[in-house]
Amino acid sequence: MVNTGDTAWILTSAALVLLMTPGLALFYGGMVRAKSVLNMMMMSFGALALISVLWVLYGYSIAFGDDVGAGLLGDPSQYFGLKGLMEDTTSEAGGLPTMAFVGFQAVFAIITVALISGAIADRAKFGSWMVFAGVWATIVYFPVAHWVFDFSLDEHVGGWIANNLAAIDFAGGTAVHINAGAAGLALALVLGKRRGFGREAMRPHNLPLVMIGAGLLWFGWFGFNAGSALAANNTAAVAWVNTLVATAAATLGWLLVEKLRDGHSTSLGAASGVVAGLVAITPACSALSPVGSIIVGFVAGALCALAVGLKYKLGYDDSLDVVGVHLVGGLWGTIAVGFFADPDAPAGVESLFFGGSVDQLWRQVVGAVAVLAYSFVLTLVIGIVIQKTIGFRITQEDEVTGIDTVVHAESGYDFASLGSSGSTAPLAGQARAEARSTEGVGA
């Protein structure tokens, strides 16, 4: 029999998580330069459109179909087109219609793909991005979701991380954030640095957009984490509270690092700290106490604030710090379960600091490293193939002109209306002249 209360909560949570992708579009869109804002937002909306369709066709089946090989892959044909599921009221959580679970997991797939786009802002062809998104979701995200989220039940056999390794990833520290962060690093290496990286200021063009986006992400993340309980119960309540305090603590941690390092705390730092805390608590929110969540969150904020500078030291151009926030924050949050998990929390596992056990710690490390390596290697291969065939990066001349104008024939802001000509052609011509004059100058 359908539990209407749980079903209502999961459908509401799914809507909250769906809102996170437009929130991410605002967050990323505000962080880029004005000439790239539409392209940046389109990459999120493009992922939303494409992955929704692929999830229904075969993504859900790969992720949650019966295992066809050592916990690595679900049967792609079992639920192709969601056949046989419209009247099925059984799921991994008793009383929850399967279609509610399908919808909830769909929005996880969408935002995971969208997260990657921040690493290649300002320089990726939109068509190539869409090709990448479809291929990457198919051979990276859908199988990893099977590993992490598909639990064995009765005669159904699920993924190896969830069942054989028994690593805890309540809402996607490995499947979402480490996965996307590793992919972002690989794509940043394939596409190379933006023109002027390390020499020119590439400041966010609209910080209010960034903060609105961060606020929407925080709001939607309660569905992300608390909704992963798959019921309106105590586990959801604990996850909700832990998500609140970890995020708040991470914001404070980031701002403190900025104050000590730079002499001032910034709105961009506050927004980034919010996301860092949300990332870190995602895998751990069912396993920690509220106090433990504060500790993990605060460390995540400080750690990610320091990690975003690695791209300048190591020489990779991760445009919007997907690596520094999502990869580093996801690794920390996943591994922190092994240090701070409280046996009184819903997950009920001991950790190094609460029980003196290292058993959960090694499981968390293995799960995190496995997803990181799988995602990085396959993304590198996919990116190289796309770059060598249809091309992934726009030309230097088009990058100077602005990807919005060149790729989408639009501008995020109608500057021409402020003048008398009513045309942006002179501005575009000037930008192209600048590009020609600097042709051959390395990034």
Image (cartoon, helix red, strand yellow):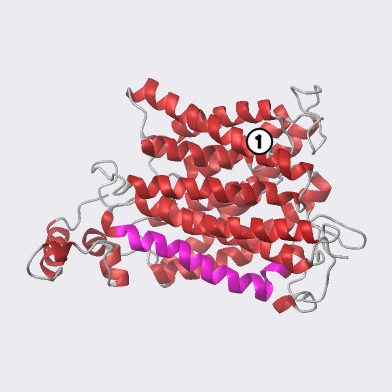
Q: Is residue 252 magenta?
A: no
| Residue 56 in magenta stretch | yes
Question: Which sits in the foreground, 265 or 365?
Answer: 265
Where's residue 248, x and y in %? 54, 33
Give the residue type at disc 1: Asn
Q: Is residue 154 left or right of residue 222?
A: right
Within 10 Å of disc 1 (Cα), the crowding (few <14, some 14-19, many 20+) is: many
Q: Which residue lies furthest to the front in this view?
A: 5
Q: Is residue 225 visible?
A: yes
Q: Residue drawn 64% across and 45% down?
A: 173
> In the image, residue 338 lies at what x, y percent?
72, 31
Res. 318 in view: no
Residue 264 in the image, given as x and y percentages of width and height = 33, 26
The number of callouts visible is: 1
- Image: magenta residue range: 36-60
Task: Please identify the quadrant where the N terminus is shown.
Answer: bottom right
Residue 380 vs residue 13, the one in the foreground? 13
- x 13%, y 70%: residue: 425
The residue at which mark 1 appears reads as 242
Query: Which is the main secondary structure of the residues drawn in magenta?
Result: helix
Apparent side of residue 213 relative to residue 149 in the rendered image (left or right) = left
Does 304 sit above or below residue 81? Answer: above
Residue at the spot x=69%, y=41% of the render?
239
Secondary structure, mark 1, is helix
- The image quadrant of residue 125 is bottom left
Q: 381 or 184, which lies in front? A: 184
Image location (x, y in percent) of residue 370: 67, 47
Asked whether, in this view, residue 364 is left or right of residue 180, the answer is: right
Q: In this view, does 71 lie to the left or right of 378?
A: right
Q: Which residue lies furthest to the left in this view?
A: 420
